[in-house]
Amino acid sequence: MNIAVIGAGATGLTAALELIREGHTLTLFEAHLLPGGMARTCLVGEEPLEIFYHHIFTSDSAVPELARELGLEERLRWMPPKNALYAGGKLHSFTSPLDLLRFSELSLPDRIRMGLFVLRTQRRSSWKDLEHLTAREWVLKETGPRIFATCWEPLLQSKFGSCANEVSATWLWNKVKLRSSSRGKGQKQELLGYLEGSFGALYTRALEELRRQGGLAFLDTEIAEIRPRGKGVLLTTARGHSTLFDKVLYTGSPRQLAALCPDLAEEERKRYRSITSMANLCLMLEMETPLSDYYWISIADKGLPFVAAIEHTNLIPRERYGCNILYLSRYLSQEHPLFKAPDEEVQERFLQGVAQIFPSWNPKMLRNSRLFRCTDTQPVVNRDYPNRIPPHQTSVSGLYLACMDQIFPEDRGQNYAIAMGRRALQILGLPEKSPEKERSVAPERGTGSR
């Protein structure tokens, strides 16, 4: 069949490879100049680096599997991070379970209560009995108001803003369980994975493999309209070129699809628009010296302009970049004044927060900065979310949807996006002709992508 995939992120590229391996004619469209979606990169010195911070957990299997298939398995590195929580106006180490016992913002009984709650959450195997609870209701019931106000409420508000009280207990359960999974059986410490040369190298290699197998890929090509035509689906680009396909797989957000395809059923449009998603601001700082020895700092104090400070070069050596890298991240509504503010205003506010957290901060440390914005980065998973998840098949014959909003109860991320792409044949209702198909590719070339 003649199939189009819209979006060259983790889901789109994986789906495209699955489809072309089954003998289908494949055309891929991507609005950006580079593949990777939210894992696309920019250059820092001569080294590619994700514009949004990325790592994987030891429980993630789809990313290592794809890296192995594409000849990049040897680049995957597993490293122990040092983590911290900023609360009460100071940094508290949160790398080991013992750090909780030293957390002075809570009384000793509350620290024990908090530890028992986390332990019970990690051991909980089912989320069904949490469906009727919000995260707020669940944590208050399990731990009490002091622990909720000190640890969980600021984190939920900084992640979901005015929607924080709507977030499902299922979402929080999965986040805690996922993080603990990186401290698996036999592991004395947490390990996080990163691909040398960036995860962007994985998606660049996937694109190369797609083209090697005869697929067409058009980058910097935005789709302006999707319409049914006869027994097919007509795609029209922003440059006015139209092509008819037997089937189309769309991997962007449902809200965006509703805007592109006017022929969707009205009830379907309402369903797509009922899913609220947070936008993200991410400021990347290139600095002369490090600010701490922590990789990930979660912000639990209200009033700071970002939710997390991720010092990437405390996980990956700074020698790869020639400087120290710090990401500052903030989730907010795309209608929020800060999301619409000029870059200079956002940077000024973020740097004021940096000065508050890090006493050693000096503006002279800053070598370069870049601000990245993205809409639809985090669905707001409320109690009714399972009923809002759209099916893969749309009301338009031949048009299908595969996106982060359909990942549940897990949270969005590279691993689950790749896993969804693996199911492309099933999503499109196509038979698998070769169950034992060979997935490996040619060995890495000396001039391969970095």
Image: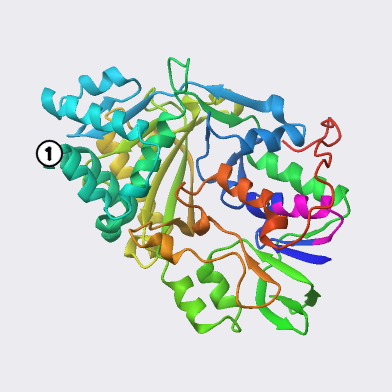
Point 86% across, 34% down: residue: 442
Whether residue 385 sits left or right of residue 100 in the image: it is right
Q: Which residues are magenta?
A: 15-26
- Does the stretch in magenta take in 448? no
Report if residue 16 lies within the magenta region. yes
Residue 220 picture location, percent across and down: 70, 62
Q: Where residue 253 sits: x, y (%)? A: 54, 64
Q: Quadrant of the N terminus?
A: bottom right
Residue 236 is situated, as x and y percent measured from the top left of the image, at 72, 77
What residue is rendered at 42% in x and 53% in y? 281
- Identify the residue shown where x is 55% and y is 65%: 391
Label 1 sits on a secondary structure element that is helix
Type of residue at label 1? Arg
Residue to which mark 1 is pinned: 146
The quarter of the displayed image where residue 241 is located:
bottom right
> Residue 381 versus residue 327: which sits nearer the camera?
381
Q: Quadrant of the C terminus?
A: top right
In the image, residue 101 sits, relative to residue 272, either above or below, namely: above
Q: Nearer the viewer, residue 362 or 165?
A: 165
**Quadrant in which residue 415 is drawn:** top right
Q: Is residue 290 visible?
A: yes
Count of labels in the image = 1
Judge from the rendering whether residue 132 lies leftward or rightward of residue 329; answer left or right: left
181 up-or-down from 278: above or below: above
Compared with 245, 33 (above or below) is above
| Residue in the image at 29% along x and 31% along y | 120
Please state if 426 lies on the left or on the right of 159 as rendered: right
